[in-house]
Amino acid sequence: MNLVDCKSASKTLKSGLPIIFPTDTLPAIGCLPKFSNIIYKFKKRHRDKPLILMGAEQKQLIDFVHESAKEDFENMASKYWPGALTIVVPASEKKTTILTSNDLTLGLRIPNSYMAQSLMRETGPLLTSSANISGFKGSITVEGIVLDFPSLKILGPIPWGKRSGKASTIIFWKKSGDWRLIREGEVLVKELY
């Protein structure tokens, strides 16, 4: 098992490789945004499925949000973050080089996980996905993840803290004050009901 601390994880990420780390929901595979192709390769993930940009705090992510959605984004983020809510918004024109979606949107999240936040304070925001081979359920234990990704480094120490094992809720910003549910998950967003 290739366990690393935040400093070593940062070096691995800068070399272009992804790492596995815990979140408050499911374990994640993450990379620096400029190396997003590597996650698709390791996960055997179809290119039509976008990745989520995770950060340690809201100020790391705000510049990725298009001006038209910033106010609504900040309101929603301040109520539900850190936590298991992924917020999909139009991306800032200045940040489109990191996009993995076909529609100029970006999913953003701040996990309620000390380890994940510590890592991203060290590295900056990471493009992420759940740590499983696409099309398979995947493990929520480090031991199971190692079987799927034997060559990848894993953020330690282990055992990781408690995780829900349930995916994040995903909401999509349609227009000012108008949010849509994409995937029901851990968080109930009362503004949608």
Image: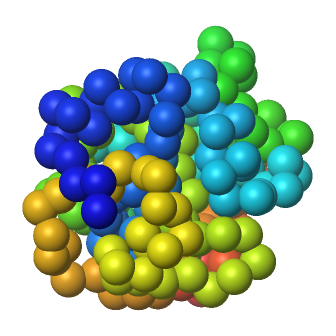
Is 8 or 24 nearer to us in this picture? 8
Q: Residue at x 15, y 76 (%)?
A: 159
Answer whether residue 28 is visible to the viewer in this image.
yes
Q: Residue at x 84, y 48 (%)?
A: 47
Question: Residue 56, how many percent across, how many down?
Answer: 27, 43
Q: Quadrant of the C terminus?
A: bottom right
Count of residue discs: 0
Indicate whether 39 appears above or below 15.
below
Is 191 or 11 nearer to us in this picture? 11
Question: Residue 50, how many percent across, how many down?
Answer: 73, 50
Residue 143 appears left or right of 5: right
Q: Quadrant of the N terminus?
A: bottom left
Residue 10 appears left or right of 118: right
Question: Residue 49, how many percent across, how many down?
Answer: 79, 56
Is 152 or 22 nearer to us in this picture? 152
Q: Residue at x 39, y 56 (%)?
A: 20
Question: Residue 163, how many percent across, how many down?
Answer: 29, 81
Residue 186 appears left or right of 177: left
Q: Residue at x 51, y 27 (%)?
A: 16
Indicate whether 114 appears above or below 25.
above
